[in-house]
Image (spheres, rainbow, N blue to C red):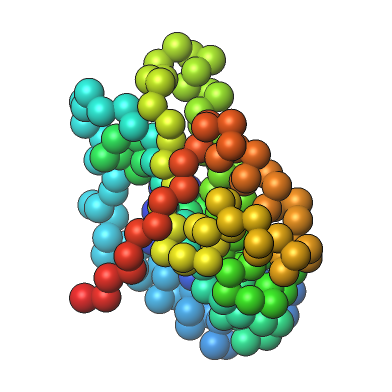
C-alpha cells in the first residue's frame, strides 16, 4: 500500500517499527490507518499525457524527529513534468549533528534516485537534455555545493557531500533553493 499511497508511508513505517512488541496503542493506530485507506480508496495519483519531460525533485527532512533515538527522517518527491513518479520517506541510519547535515543526507538520497531515473530514461531513449533540478529548503545545504569554506566543518558527512557535489560539477544535477512557505 505504501507504494501506491505515499501519504501513509511515514505512518506505516512508524507503526512497523514496533511489530516485535505490539501494544494496544499501536493496534489502534493500525486500525486508524486501515480506516483512512478505506475512506480514501477512490483517491490516487493521476498521470496524463504531457510534453514536459523536466525531471525535478524536492527534498526535506525532519531533524532529530524520532523521540526514541533522535534520528532524522529523510523525504523526497521526484517529478517528471507535473507527475509524481518516485517518492520516499525513511529514517536516516545515523544521528545527524546539525540540520544542515540532515538535509544534506536527504539531498544525497534524492540525488541517487534522480541519477537512477536519469539513467533509466536515457537508456530507453526518452530523456531530454535539460539538467534535473533538486529543490532544497535549507540554504546551508544548498551552499555546500559551491562554497569550499564549509568543507572543514563537514568531515563527518564527506561521502554524501562528494557524491552530490560530483553530480553538480558534472552538470548532471542542479540544486536550487526553494523558500519554504507556511500557509
- Answer above or below: position of 17 versus 54: below
Q: Position of residue 85 (x, y in %)?
A: 40, 39
Q: Position of residue 84 (x, y in %)?
A: 35, 43
Q: Which one is in front, 27 or 96?
A: 96
Quadrant of the image occupied by residue 33: bottom left
* Outermost top residue: 125
Q: Residue at x 26, y 40 (%)?
A: 82
Q: Residue at x 43, y 31 (%)?
A: 131
Q: Which one is in front, 134 or 154?
A: 154
State how many labels appear. Answer: 0
Task: Decide if residue 54 is on the left or right side of residue 116.
Answer: left
Residue 35: in sight, yes or no? yes
- Answer above or below: position of 82 versus 106: above
Q: Residue at x 47, y 22 (%)?
A: 121
Q: Residue at x 47, y 66 (%)?
A: 138
Quadrant of the image occupied by residue 38: bottom left
Task: Decide if residue 24 is on the left or right side of residue 125.
Answer: right
Quadrant of the image occupied by residue 168: top right
Q: Position of residue 83 (x, y in %)?
A: 30, 39
Q: Position of residue 182 (x, y in %)?
A: 27, 75
| Quarter of the image where the C terminus is located | bottom left
* Outermost front residue: 149
Task: Decide if residue 144 is on the left or right side of residue 158.
Answer: left
- Answer above or below: position of 60 versus 176: below
Residue 74: in sight, yes or no? no
- Answer above or below: position of 146 versus 21: above
Amino acid at each position: 500500500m505504501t507504494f501506491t499511497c505515499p501519504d501513509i508511508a511515514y505512518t506505516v513505517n512508524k507503526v512497523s517499527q514496533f511489530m516485535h512488541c505490539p501494544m494496544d496503542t499501536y493496534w489502534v493506530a493500525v486500525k486508524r490507518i486501515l480506516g483512512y485507506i478505506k475512506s480514501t480508496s477512490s483517491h490516487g495519483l493521476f498521470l496524463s499525457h504531457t510534453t514536459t519531460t523536466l525531471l525535478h525533485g524536492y527534498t526535506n527532512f525532519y531533524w532529530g524527529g524520532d523521540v526514541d533515538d533522535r534520528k532524522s527522517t529523510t523525504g523526497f518527491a521526484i517529478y517528471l513534468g507535473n507527475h509524481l513518479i518516485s517518492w520516499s520517506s525513511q529514517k536516516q541510519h545515523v544521528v545527524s549533528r546539525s540540520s544542515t547535515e540532515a538535509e544534506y543526507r536527504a539531498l544525497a538520497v534524492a540525488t541517487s534516485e534522480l541519477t537512477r531515473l536519469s539513467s533509466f530514461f536515457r537508456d530507453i531513449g526518452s530523456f531530454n537534455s535539460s539538467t534535473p533540478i533538486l529543490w532544497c529548503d535549507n540554504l546551508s545545504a544548498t551552499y555546500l555545493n559551491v562554497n569550499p569554506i564549509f568543507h572543514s566543518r563537514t568531515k563527518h558527512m564527506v561521502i554524501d557531500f562528494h557524491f552530490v557535489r560530483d553530480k553538480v560539477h558534472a552538470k548532471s544535477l542542479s540544486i536550487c533553493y526553494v523558500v519554504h512557505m507556511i500557509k
